[in-house]
């Protein structure tokens, strides 16, 4: 006890030395980890480091479930930099927010209905992002076919031509071809790597291109002339799809305007007669009528979208 000040100084110095040593070890390990990640990202073995990921623990547990795997597959096709855990948490937050908003501005009966619509909307959002990315990829197919034709005409192998196209093209074609190139680099057959590409981004144009490449690679045919002819065909289809989309733009707007008018009518009714929706949904007849009305609006939306869908 008489040496308590000396003992305190000694313990303090020891803790300081251990703290400095621990900080030095942590800094060295972090530098080595960053160097390893940078080296592996340049070789294509892991993706380049991006933004900070949230909800990592929940994301790992979600990926082990069937729902998590389905969300992961859909996100992979959309190209969004969002993990399944992040998307699930954001979707739950949006569902809760729409529930509260519908209950506050309309009536408490509309809360669960808004939650169901939010679940449908989350799935529709993923499908829309996938379709949008597929459309962008289809627009790049003529340029992709032209690059492959020029590379093979110059005497390069098809695998090398695909790697060259991945470097020259922008996203999404560049990203998808980089993925195919990495799979080919580890020895996977060309047919399997390209088949996975058609599964992620399904389209008739891509199927035709993949079939041409696979058959030419398997049979040893004249891939250059085939790609030249395919390039012209893809250019014509691109212009045709653009014209059809322009002609059907008014029908597409009508499909979205129909349910918006119905929601606007409900809000207008509740604004003119405060509490009208509460009284209407307080009875079973009113609840059934609301459900039938929402089903009819949804049916009208689906029918209009089906009528405006033209496969080329």
Image (cartoon, rainbow, N blue to C red):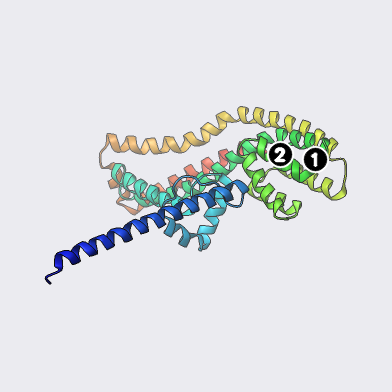
Disc 1/disc 2 C-alpha distance (Å): 10 Å
Q: Is residue 200 left or right of residue 223?
A: left
Frontmost residue, 89 versus 2:
2
Q: Earlier in the sequence, mark 1 or mark 2?
A: 1
Q: Which mark is residue 174?
A: none
Instruction: Classify mark 1: helix, strand or loop.
Output: loop
Whether 244 is drawn above or below 173: the answer is above
The residue carrying pointer 2 sits among few (fewer than 14), some (14 to 19) or many (20 or more) residues within 10 Å by Cα, namely some
Disc 1, disc 2: CB below 8 Å?
yes
Q: Which mark is residue 156?
A: 1
Q: Residue 176, percent across and down? A: 64, 44
Q: Is residue 243 left or right of residue 208?
A: left
Residue 88 seen in the current view: no
Q: Residue at x 50, y 58 (%)?
A: 68
Frontmost residue, 168 versus 245:
168
Q: Is residue 94 left or right of residue 256?
A: left
Q: Is residue 22 left or right of residue 42?
A: left
The quadrant holding residue 204 is top right
Q: Residue at x 61, y 52 (%)?
A: 45
Whether 188 is drawn above or below 181: the answer is below
Q: Residue 83, percent across and down? A: 49, 51
Q: Which residue is mark 2?
A: 164
């Amino acid at each position: 006890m008489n040496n308590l000040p000396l003992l305190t100084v000694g313990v303090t110095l020891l803790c300081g030395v251990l703290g400095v040593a621990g900080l030095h070890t942590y800094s060295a390990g972090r530098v080595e980890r960053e160097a390893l990640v940078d080296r592996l990202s340049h070789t294509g073995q892991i993706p380049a480091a991006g933004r900070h990921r949230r909800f990592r623990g929940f994301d790992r547990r979600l990926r082990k479930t069937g729902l998590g795997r389905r969300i992961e597959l859909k996100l992979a096709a959309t190209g969004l930099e969002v993990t399944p855990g992040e998307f699930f948490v954001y979707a739950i937050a949006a569902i809760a927010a729409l529930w509260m908003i519908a209950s506050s501005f309309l009536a408490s009966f509309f809360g669960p209905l808004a939650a169901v619509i939010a679940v449908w909307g989350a799935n529709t959002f993923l499908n829309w992002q996938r379709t949008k990315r597929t459309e962008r990829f289809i627009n790049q197919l003529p340029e992709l076919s032209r690059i492959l034709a020029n590379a093979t005409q110059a005497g390069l192998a098809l695998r090398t031509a695909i790697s060259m196209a991945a470097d020259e093209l922008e996203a999404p074609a560049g990203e998808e071809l980089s993925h195919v190139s990495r799979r080919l680099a580890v020895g996977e057959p060309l047919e399997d790597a390209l088949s996975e590409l058609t599964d992620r981004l399904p389209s008739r144009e891509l199927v035709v291109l993949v079939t041409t490449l696979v058959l030419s690679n398997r049979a040893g045919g004249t891939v250059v002339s085939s790609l030249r002819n395919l390039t012209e065909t893809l250019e014509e289809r691109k212009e045709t799809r653009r014209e059809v989309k322009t002609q059907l733009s008014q029908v597409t707007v009508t499909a979205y305007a129909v349910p918006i008018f119905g929601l606007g009518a409900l809000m207008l009714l509740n604004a003119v007669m405060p509490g009208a929706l509460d009284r209407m949904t307080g009875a079973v007849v009113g609840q059934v009528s609301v459900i039938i009305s929402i089903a009819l609006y949804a049916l009208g939306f689906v029918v209009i979208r089906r009528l405006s869908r033209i496969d080329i």
